[in-house]
Image (cartoon, coloured by chain):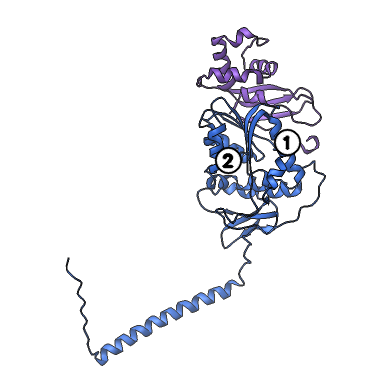
Chain colours: A blue, B purple
Amino acid sequence: ATARRVSLTFRRLGVATRRAFDAANAATAARRAAKRDKRREKKRRAGPAAPQVKATPTPVAIVETDGVQTPAIEREHVWRVYEAVAPQWHGTRYKAWPRVAAFCQEHCLGGAVVADVGCGNGKMAPAATARGARVLACDVSARLVAIAAREHASKHYDALVADALRLPWRSGVADAALHIAVLHHLSTPERRSRAIAETTRVLKVGGVALFYAWARDQRRGRSGHAFDAPDVLVPFHLREHGPHWDPSACDAAPAHAVRDAAKRATVVQRYCHVYDEGELAALVS
Amino acid sequence: MVRLHTINTLRCNRKDVDEGRLSLEATKVDVREESAFDREFLVHLLPTLEWPSLRDAARAVGVTLPDALDDALKTDEAFLRALHHILFDVHVVEGSLRCVESGQVFPISDGRPNMMLPEEVV
């Protein structure tokens, strides 16, 4: 290869050339100024910008309830949120978490009856049924259950609508149970204990359950942050565009939903109780 | 789609109910091709079946099962294969489950039972 050669030419500009260059530069500067002024005028005429919708988790206080009926915070910030976001949720949640897949490899074998509590869109179905296990799945969101049933119609995965605190199964019918990302949606320790008790009721003696919920301190994990409080509202942007946008979802929006015009999205808040180290283990034992 | 085995695992979960046995009414059924027969699994499953409920549910979809599951049947290959087919290949698409004790009705629509209860009876 030949070495690169650089050649420089110096020329004295004639007066006419210099004048032409100056005129061209002035014209460009004038064009840019006009564009900038037009932009500023447009913004001025548009009025003050709509307040940005907060997009980070917010601490929330839990009100004492009688403990029997579903608390309002769960109805509004869990049940109604999932009903509203189901298609987009499904479009963005498709990979089983690594440790869940490992649990399935060990316990969801051919000849096992497995309960998938809080199955959502059936994300765990491939992992849970891969080795021939028969899966009974449930979720409180009818829309998510419809998606789960449709997506996994050819698998041994029967999905139905049910509340995790009142599982519809007879005692001792399951060899194994998955309880993924459910316990962080329950707002009182009593409700969490009941959910765990219901799951163990459905398990046969010697059966195994995997309970998996959000930690408060996630600094070592993928998200790399810690939550400010044990009970928080976490925003979810229901986008009005993209492949998962379903215009009919507008009708299902919960009362607290706020439209973020800038992002063309409706922001809903999911209630989460995030667990301190050892809290979940203590609850189960 | 909800299989007869799944239906057999269900019960009415109202707090004022004892056993919660459910009675099936099926208006639309989808019978699929015979899935892979796992003899060992089926034999392992037999003790967990609620036989009277299963017999009634099978009747609701037009199948007759013996009154009781005796030891002779548990080793009858042909019977086990037939039972496997009834449990895992018959899907209820439309229908309902009714609690024999309380009368609570749980609809099955598009192959999905809705087992949610009104708040008062949870």
Question: Is residue A79 among what the camera can see?
Answer: no
- Residue A197 — which label? 1
Q: Nearer the viewer, residue A117 or A155?
A: A117
- Chain for mark 1? A
The Cα atoms of the two marked residues, 1 and 2, are separated by 24 Å
Q: Is residue B74 left or right of residue A16?
A: right
x 45%, y 81%: residue:
A33
Q: Is residue A226 left or right of residue A1?
A: right
Q: Is residue A83 above or below residue B41?
A: below
Q: Please tell me whether mark 2 sits on a helix, a strand or a loop.
A: loop
- Circle 2 is placed at which residue position? A121
Q: Please tell me whether mark 1 sits on a helix, a strand or a loop.
A: helix
Please report whichever mark, 1 or 2, sits nearer to the chain's N-terminal start: 2
* Image x and y of residue A101, in percent: 53, 39
The N terminus of chain A, quarter of image? bottom left
* Image x and y of residue A154, in percent: 51, 30
